[in-house]
Image (cartoon, grey):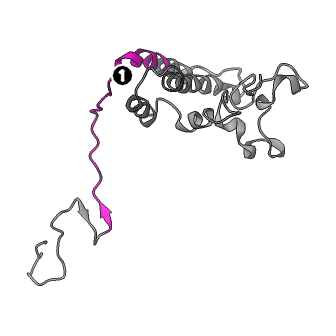
Amino acid sequence: MGFSILFFNSPFRLPASTDQDPSLGRTMPKVKTNRVKYPEGWELIEPTLRELQAKMREAENDPHDGKRKCETLWPIFKIAHQKSRYIFDLYHRRKEISKELYEFCLDQGYADRNLIAKWKKPGYERLCCLRCMQPRDHNFATTCVCRVPKHLREEKVIECVHCGCKGCASGD
């Protein structure tokens, strides 16, 4: 129970436990620490992920003089795709990392969980980014031109406006 502020029978009582009080309907925020426990096997993939993060930082700070607005984001999308594909391949294809390490990488943001979920589905094994399959981002409520197989394209050389992909259809 709690104690009264002024009187023992007062309706103004403080809760006995301030971290969780069901009557207040709220909880105390968790204290965030910088101490992250890395799972077993992290030392094997850490150098590659650090290298990709350095490339990402470099791409973010790159000058974009003379480029179209959409072209400035292409290297960032490419590196994010590389990081996700690296972790996906290590866990699903080569089976070199544990489920615990795989989940840790997804939770810490080293890979895109939604993109990897699409790669598991048939027809999306080579998907470059999630924007390329969303109909709301394209004319006529269709998907991106990079999702069209090469043998069905009128133009042989294309580039996606969103991420710079030259073709990510599964049939290519």
Q: For the residue marked with disc 1, what is the amino acid?
A: Trp
The percent position of residue 150, horizontal first and vertical second, equals 83, 23
Q: Choose between 70 and 39: the one closer to the eye.
A: 39
The residue indicated by pointer 1 is 42
Q: Is residue 36 left or right of residue 138?
A: left
Please name the residue shown 44% across and 20% down the image. Answer: 96
Does the magenta segment cover residue 28?
yes
- The relative height of residue 83 versus residue 108 in the rendered view (above or below) is above
Which secondary structure, mark 1?
helix
Does the magenta segment cover residue 78?
no
Please name the residue shown 10% across and 73% down the image. Answer: 3
Q: Quadrant of the C terminus?
A: top right
The percent position of residue 102, horizontal first and vertical second, equals 43, 30
Please name the residue shown 30% across and 53% down the image. Answer: 29
Q: Quadrant of the N terminus?
A: bottom left
Q: Is residue 30 left or right of residue 144?
A: left
Q: Which residues are magenta?
A: 25-52
Please name the residue shown 67% across and 20% down the image. Answer: 65
Q: Choose between 68 and 166: the one closer to the eye.
A: 166
Give the farthest residue toward the right. 154
Q: Choose between 127 and 144: the one closer to the eye.
A: 127
The percent position of residue 42, horizontal first and vertical second, equals 36, 22
The percent position of residue 128, horizontal first and vertical second, equals 66, 28
Crowd tier of the residue under label 1, counting other residues whose Cα lies within 10 Å: few below 14, some 14–19, many 20 or above: some
Q: Is residue 122 left or right of residue 3?
A: right
